[in-house]
Image (spheres, rainbow, N blue to C red):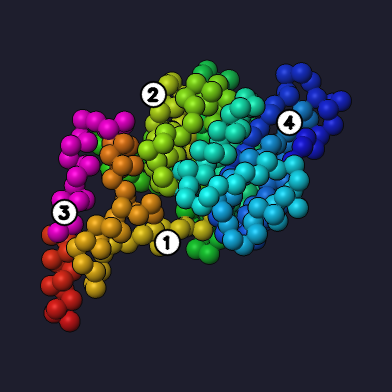
């Protein structure tokens, strides 16, 4: 996806290279829809988009379809065991090699607005002009079915605890400071990305975006939610791995808890130790110690039926 504006009209101080990093798996039409809308992004003269897509061994022809319709997209393949964080690690890692001015992490089930990239970039630049430094900016998503905000950014009730937290509703015109960012569509300035590097290997599917935002803040970057919404994305919480309910043995529940879509111990422990070490001893084993009690409760409830 090359520069759609005329290079002749671009001044030297407006030339910007923007990398978009995407991980895809078996959602060919969804992925293509995302890329079609991304291709229609409103760019300024001198700006260019460079898309890096990791296909995690899709069996529905996603990689070939992307190569056919979008020959400028950098498509990479994997054996099929990377999940979201692993896939983004590959796509982002490849993008980092070219040292772009900005990086956008993006889910392939997002339908971005034509001005989504513009909003994220301009918000980051305006914050830098106003406050100095560099600023990560997350874009709020609206669930196309419910019409409610589904993703974007969160605010912690207490800075020293990882929960409770609440989804922030965006202001129509002003960016809002936040504590945790979703990577459904997240802008990272180049200097921050180059200083921090890639997503840590401890993350398989979840928590990689939260970790990166908190790490960036420790490095001096600001975390913000962009004004308004930048696209639509269905809330995928019901698709996460569940270990509650009836009909499962305790061992089966523990195995489900370790699934990448659930709360694998390594990712959970790594996140807590990196960002909330003062309460890690409580929060890391908490769900695992509580599970036998919950298991008995679910069994008793099933017997009463």
| Residue drawn at point x = 28 percent, y = 36 percent | 272
Q: CA distance from mark 3 to mark 2?
A: 32 Å
If you read the primary sequence from the N terminus, does the residue marked by circle 2 or circle 1 appear first? 2
Name the residue nearer the viewer: 135 or 267.
267
If you read the primary sequence from the N terminus, does the residue marked by circle 3 or circle 2 appear first? 2
If you read the primary sequence from the N terminus, does the residue marked by circle 4 or circle 1 appear first? 4
Q: CA distance from mark 2 to mark 1?
A: 32 Å
Q: Which residues are magenta?
A: 273-292
Whole-percent x, y for residue 60 in the image: 62, 62
| Residue drawn at point x = 37 percent, y = 38 percent | 202
Whole-percent x, y for residue 205 in the image: 42, 47
Residue wearing tag 2: 218
Q: Is residue 254 left or right of residue 113?
A: left
Q: CA distance from mark 2 to mark 4?
A: 29 Å
If you read the primary sequence from the N terminus, does the residue marked by circle 1 or circle 3 appear first? 1
Q: Is residue 107 left or right of residue 302?
A: right
- Crowd band around label 2 with a 10 angstrom C-alpha radius: few (<14), some (14–19), many (20+): few
Q: Is residue 175 left or right of residue 156?
A: right
| Residue drawn at point x = 13 percent, y = 59 percent | 293
Residue wearing tag 4: 47
**Secondary structure predominantly adopted by residues drawn in magenta:** helix
Q: Which mark is residue 49?
A: none
Q: CA distance from mark 4 to mark 1?
A: 37 Å
- Crowd band around label 4 with a 10 angstrom C-alpha radius: few (<14), some (14–19), many (20+): many
Q: Nearer the viewer, mark 3 or mark 2?
A: 3
State which quadrant residue 240 falls in.
bottom left
Residue wearing tag 3: 290
Q: Looking at this view, name the residue that lies furthest to the right.
A: 8
Residue wearing tag 1: 239
If you read the primary sequence from the N terminus, does the residue marked by circle 3 or circle 4 appear first? 4
Name the residue nearer the viewer: 191 or 126.
191
Contact check, label 3 and label 4, Cβ < 8 Å: no
């Amino acid at each position: 996806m090359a520069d759609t504006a005329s290079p002749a009209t671009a001044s030297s101080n407006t030339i910007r290279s923007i990398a978009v990093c995407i991980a895809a798996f078996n959602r060919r039409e969804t992925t293509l829809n995302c890329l079609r809308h991304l291709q229609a992004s409103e760019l300024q003269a001198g700006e260019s988009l460079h898309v890096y897509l990791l296909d995690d061994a899709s069996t529905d022809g996603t990689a070939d379809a992307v190569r056919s319709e979008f020959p400028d997209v950098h498509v990479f393949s994997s054996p099929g065991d990377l999940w979201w964080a692993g896939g983004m690690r590959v796509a982002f890692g490849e993008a980092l090699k070219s040292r772009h001015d900005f990086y956008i992490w993006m889910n392939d089930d997002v339908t971005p607005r034509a001005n989504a990239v513009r909003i994220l970039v301009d918000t980051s630049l305006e914050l830098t002009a106003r406050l100095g430094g560099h600023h990560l900016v997350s874009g709020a998503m609206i669930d196309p079915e419910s019409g409610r905000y589904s993703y974007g950014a969160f605010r912690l009730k207490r800075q020293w605890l990882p929960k409770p937290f609440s989804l922030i509703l965006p202001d129509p015109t002003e960016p809002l400071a936040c504590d945790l960012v979703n990577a459904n569509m997240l802008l990272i300035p180049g200097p921050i990305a180059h200083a921090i590097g890639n997503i840590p290997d401890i993350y398989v599917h979840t928590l990689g975006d939260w970790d990166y935002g908190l790490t960036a803040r420790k490095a001096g970057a600001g975390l913000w939610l962009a004004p308004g919404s930048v696209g639509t994305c269905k809330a995928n919480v019901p698709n996460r791995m569940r270990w509650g309910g009836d009909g499962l043995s305790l061992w089966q529940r523990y195995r489900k808890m370790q699934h990448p879509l659930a709360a694998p111990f390594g990712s959970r422990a790594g996140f807590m130790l990196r960002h909330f070490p003062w309460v890690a001893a409580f929060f890391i084993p908490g769900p695992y110690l509580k599970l036998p009690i919950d298991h008995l409760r679910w069994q008793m409830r099933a017997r009463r039926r």
